Each structure stands twice: as structure tokens, then as C-alpha cells.
Image: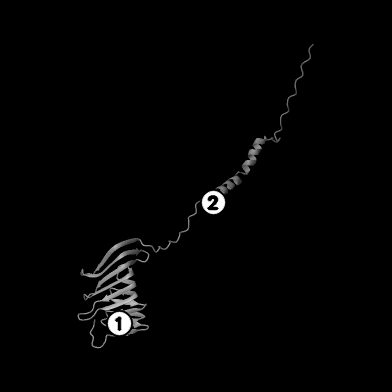
């Protein structure tokens, strides 16, 4: 008689309150998720630093360099005329070469020749090796062999001024010099260390050491 086969014991069921052993990938994910906020903050800080360090910085405004004293145009063998409101000629300036300086709005003229007409019609002429003038030519500083001739009234000899420097104001008919000047009229010749002449007031101021030469008695103006 055959004996019955032995049966394998059935596995005992897991208690309800027994702990569940998690696998290591799940545990790693759980650990990483706990540091996720800190990691995001670090990435944000790193991105902010990169953005600031690579943002171009605006250059400070540079001060404008002062204009250089160089001519912006030059004219050769020129002639410039100025007219009064009634159309009459007031001044004519000509020379070998003229240079205009925009930084000071002045003119530099080589071998200048000037002809100015006063409101009463009398003419003043001048020439020099060099002149510096303002923009409209109404004021000239004559340098080097300067000579100014003021036409006299009818029957009156002209007045002649000579020196190495004469400052001429054409509109106000004044002359000025801080250097020696010789003034002649007829046979009279005056030498002074400086001069102020105002034709409107008919006043001549001779400054410094003054010497004079007068015509001999009985001789008229020359």
C-alpha cells in the first residue's frame, strides 16, 4: 500500500505590521528630492551671478575735448568787403593768405591791406606783415611794420601812425598800442612808448617817454 506524498509546508503569511524594506533606487530618489529646493536656489544664485558678471557696463560720459587751434579753411589772394546798412562800403580787407580759426572765430592774415571808410567819408588805410582780426574784420591787430594813415579834413595833413604793433578798431575809429609808436602829421613827428587814439573825441594819449620834432618856424605842413 502506497504511503501518501509529503506536502511542502505552506509559507507563513507576513504580519500586517511588518516593515516594508524599500529598494535602494527608491531611497536614493527620496534623498535627492529632499535636497531639491536647496539645489534650485543654488542654481538660481549661480545664474544671477553669471548674468551680472556678463552684463555690459555703460561707459562713463567722456568730457568733450576742447577744439584745437587749427584753421578750418584757408584763402589765398583774397578780398573781403563790409557794407553799411545804406549799402555804402565801410571796410575792405585783402591779403596774401587768410586762415580762419573756428575755436576763437578769428582770422590770421599775411601781408594785410585795409581800407576803411568813416561815416563822414574820410578814408583810413593800413598795412602790415601780419594781422589778427575778429570774425567780422571790425577789429585788427596789425603786427610787423604796421602803418596806419588817417585822411585829414580839407586843408589838413593826414595823420600817420607807425610801429611794430597797432590795434585798430575800425567801427569806433580808435587806435591803441602798448609798444613804441611814431605819429606824424605834416612836419610834426612824435615818438611814444605807447599810444591811445580816439578819433571821435579827437584825443591822442602818448604814454611813457615821449619825444617830439616840430617843423622849423615859417614852414607850413608837409
Q: CA distance from mark 1 to mark 2?
A: 82 Å
Q: Which residue is mark 2?
A: 53
User: x, y percentage for residue 84?
Assistant: 23, 70
Q: Nearer the viewer, residue 170 or 145?
A: 145
Is residue 207 positioned above or below 3 on the image? below
Q: Would you say residue 84 is visible in this rendering? A: no
Q: Secondary structure at mark 1?
A: strand
Determine whether, in the image, residue 143 is placed left or right of residue 15: left
Residue drawn where x is 36% and y is 80% of the image: 194
Q: Would you say residue 180 is visible in this rendering? A: yes
Determine whether, in the image, residue 222 is placed left or right of residue 143: left
Q: Which residue is mark 1?
A: 189
Is residue 155 positioned above or below 79 on the image? below
User: x, y percentage for residue 97?
Assistant: 32, 64
User: x, y percentage for residue 17?
Assistant: 70, 35
Residue drawn where x is 26% and y is 73% of the image: 125
Amino acid at each position: 500500500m502506497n504511503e501518501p506524498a509529503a506536502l511542502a509546508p505552506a509559507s507563513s503569511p507576513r504580519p500586517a505590521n511588518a516593515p516594508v524594506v524599500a529598494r535602494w533606487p527608491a531611497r536614493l530618489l527620496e534623498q535627492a528630492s529632499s535636497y531639491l529646493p536647496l539645489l534650485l536656489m543654488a542654481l538660481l544664485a549661480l545664474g544671477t551671478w553669471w548674468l551680472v558678471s556678463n552684463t555690459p557696463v555703460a561707459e562713463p560720459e567722456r568730457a568733450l575735448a576742447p577744439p584745437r587751434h587749427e584753421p578750418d579753411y584757408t584763402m589765398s589772394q583774397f578780398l573781403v568787403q563790409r557794407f553799411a546798412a545804406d549799402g555804402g562800403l565801410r571796410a575792405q580787407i585783402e591779403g596774401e593768405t587768410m586762415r580762419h580759426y573756428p575755436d576763437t572765430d578769428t582770422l590770421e592774415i599775411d601781408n594785410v591791406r585795409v581800407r576803411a571808410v568813416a561815416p563822414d567819408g574820410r578814408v583810413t588805410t593800413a598795412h602790415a606783415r601780419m594781422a589778427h582780426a575778429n570774425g567780422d574784420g571790425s577789429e585788427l591787430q596789425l603786427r610787423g611794420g604796421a602803418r596806419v594813415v588817417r585822411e585829414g579834413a580839407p586843408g589838413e595833413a593826414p595823420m600817420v601812425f607807425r610801429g611794430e604793433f597797432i590795434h585798430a578798431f575800425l567801427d569806433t575809429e580808435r587806435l591803441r598800442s602798448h609798444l613804441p609808436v611814431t605819429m606824424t602829421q605834416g612836419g610834426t613827428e612824435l615818438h611814444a612808448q605807447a599810444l591811445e587814439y580816439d578819433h571821435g573825441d579827437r584825443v591822442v594819449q602818448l604814454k611813457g617817454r615821449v619825444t617830439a620834432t616840430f617843423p622849423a618856424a615859417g614852414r607850413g605842413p608837409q
